[in-house]
Image (spheres, coloured by chain):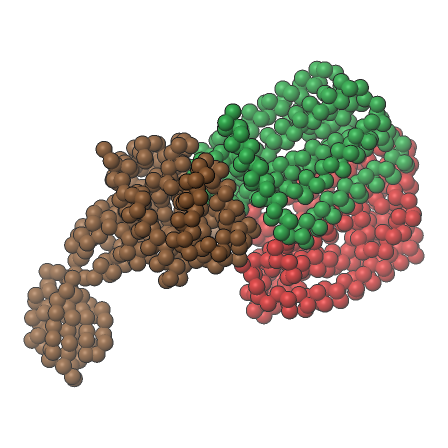
Amino acid sequence: MRKYLTIFKISFQQEFAYRLNFVLWRVRNVLQIFIAFFLWNTIFSDPGRVVFGYDRAKILTYIFGLIIIRAIVLSSRAIDIAGEVSRGDLTNQLLRPMGYIKYWFTRDLSSKALNLIFSVFEASILFLIFKPQFFFQTNFLLFFLFLTSLVIAVILFFFLMFIANMLPLWLPDQPWGMSFLLFIFTDFLGGGVFPLDILPSYITKIIYLTPFPYLLFMPLQIYLGKLDLITSFNSILIGTVWVIVLALGTKVVWSQGLKSYGAVGR
Amino acid sequence: MDRVVVVDHLVKHFEVNEKRPGIIGSLSTLFFPKKRTVQALKEISFSVKKGELVGFIGPNGAGKTTTLKILSGILYPSSGFVQVGGYTPWERKEDFLKQISLIMGQKNQLWWDLPAIETFELNRAIYEIPERSYKRSLDELTTLLDVEDILTVPVRRLSLGQRMRMELIAALLHKPEIIFLDEPTIGLDLVGQKVVRDFIDDYNRKNEATILLTSHNMDDVLGLAKRVIVIDEGSIIFDGKLEELTAHFAKEKEIRVFLKNGADYKKLEEIGKVKKVKHPEVVLSVPRAEVATAAARILENFQVEDLTITEESLDDIIRKVFQGKLRKP
Amino acid sequence: MKKLIKYLHLWWMMSKNSFVMVFYSKAALVIFLTGKILRFGFFVIFLIFLLKGTNSLAGYNLNQTLFFFLTYTIVDTLSQFLFREVYRFRPQIISGDFDLTLSKPISALFRSLLGGADVIDLITVPPLIYALIYVGAMLHPTLFQIFIYIILLLSGLLIATAFHIAVLSLAILSLEIDHAVMIYRDIVSLGRFPTDIYKEPLRGVLTYLVPVGLMVTLPAQFLIGLVTFQGVLVSFLVCAVFLFASVSLWKFALRYYTSASS
């Protein structure tokens, strides 16, 4: 256990060591929120307007919530896995007395901790500048379900990233292909750009069957109280099912991939 | 005036940011950056005639690569006069660049995923080599380096030795008159090294190209350079023929002793530095001035079968140069 | 003139090399092409349903909003097509291979900016142009408006060029920043929507300082008939200023590199 704590600390320090880089990474995150904020701000410039089941307070809460949720769920160091595999550095890691998957999950958590601190800071500043109306969830049970869904989202995203980063085991020349696709799916199908319920139900029905909405959209929906208790509980259930499926998938891909890897590198 | 390279009082400083360790250190580095000046070259001067093959040797960080980069126009100096082929290198005029070639060991100009021939074609366009001249150079070089059948293999599938040969071709297609080589044999196996060395030697002879190379490899120096320039800590401490290197630096002589059975060679350590023991042979090195007395003492105190006195080998001297154990006498 | 021909010829050869490399790896072609199409498609679907529900965005209808997005996409795609090599520049600096580029009788800026045209983006251009024409036609522009629109697009592309040159310079000047080009992409992506949605002072910044507005919103606005000739002139002026500034930055960066490389 102690060695994972050490990994957590070192990963934290390393990310922070490249200060300028890290600051610019945060700037990028904020920029992405800007688009969403201004877009919805314009649409809801009439404060009484209600559309897609949102009013101004709820939609702006969604956007601001995204800053924090994205930092918690989507911050990840697992994207370095692809590079490690593609360069052949995986061999060294496999020789260490440490679970490879546990190692990367620890590094992920470390990154999330770092990004969370900064995103809270940024959200506060943006809050003071734009002074949007914020919706506070007061139902204790719903809030608890919200936290649960966050935990599921974190684990879900890790498994998705891990599997996507396993691509170079088969295609060492294209390490980031799957991560590229994963981010596109997450952004759109996960509610990272817009709340999914602006889409008609015949489309959302299909999307809710994929794991992506459970990363960003569902936790926020639970928080905003747009789902009643039963639906919230259901969504957590489906999220859990996906966690189990992807956990198994990760195990399978990992063992198959190692066989194909054969310590070939550059 | 057939001096192709002229260097006069060349000085080069680098400004380096000092990074301090630890969290407090890194914070203070962020807010109060400290700069340190490194003097890479401290007024060096030399000149090279057309067709010469000069080797720059010295310990790591001595300034060899810096010199080469300034001569090829990649770095510009802090002060001093440099002229290569009649041009000021760091102005990087097109006509200057067409005359020179820079080959750096383990750095590639070849497009990684494509066959080497594609890079050659691209270089032909870049250097504006006329068709006939290009074809002739290509045939000549590929035959000499024995790579005709791997011209169409993607570069990333070639071995390091094959890749180096392709790099050589890519660098020489435009028949440069001045060639700069930085550690050309690094990372190659013995066979690969010999191929590169023989090729450079051949090229120098046939085309009268002026060649300047830096190397940390003993065999490169012994096999190629007729003239060596020794750079240590930014200054030239020797510039002359390879053979003269010994005379200039050899401060010790070697005594080779063949002891009769039963002799205790450990006692020999009191007389001089024991360099090699292969019973019954022992090799000692002794300061020049003391060699006569040392020999006498050995003959007096030991049962000696045979004794010879020789100069310190060139190998050892060069090794000392690489390790920075020689300073201006 | 001869120089221009030489450089066109070199660009053609390097682009050919670039294309061939992609075709060698079918997986790359499929994955990235799919990703780009999906990214585009998802956003279009989003716009359609967004405007279905809200009827107008900052005063623009669905047709116009789509046209803004298509204008953004064509400028962004053409930039990626031409300047893909910029994304590969930083590893060259770190490994020192850039020295070899410098030692050749070819402009280092040319090589680093245009040396790796991306065929995957090129493939997406014809359908994009078709969509652009299809949606644009529904706005009933005059021939003159179309002509100025194309000129403004080119001006926008030149501003994008200036940005990429600045990114190259930054890669030399600061070894720490490893994704300067992605920051550029993020800023430009603010232009997916007409810049009218942004409040001052951000809108002003986006229009003149970091001229995303001039790059993508302005051409589309012109076609819709909202821009005066003054606006067009301002766009050209800003374009020229940016190009000059970025090339000066590059020259400075090169001087810095050649005094500090070790």
User: Quadrant of the rendered structure where residue A169 is?
Assistant: bottom right
Whole-percent x and y of residue B297?
A: 8, 72
Whole-percent x and y of residue B97?
A: 40, 36
Point out the image quarter for the N terminus of chain B. top left
The residue most toward the front is B132
Left or right placement of residue C113 versus residue A123 in this view:
left
Between B288 and C113, the one lying in front of the other is: C113
User: Quadrant of the rendered structure where residue B252 is?
Assistant: bottom left
Q: In the rendered view, tell whether residue B132 sits above or below residue A189.
A: above
> Tag count in the figure?
0
Residue A24 in sight in this render? no
The colour with which the image depicts chain A is: red
Left or right placement of residue C54 versus residue B328 in this view:
right
The colour with which the image depicts chain B is: brown
Whole-percent x and y of residue C244?
A: 55, 25
Between A198 and A110, the one lying in front of the other is: A198
- Residue at image point 46% right, 39% down: B131
Residue C122 in sight in this render? yes
Left or right placement of residue A99 versus residue B309 in this view:
right
- Residue at image point 85% right, 46% down: A196
- Residue at image point 15% right, 68% down: B255
- Residue at image point 72% right, 40% down: C124
Between B87 and A103, the one lying in front of the other is: B87
User: Quadrant of the rendered structure where residue C176 is?
Assistant: top right
Which chain: green? C
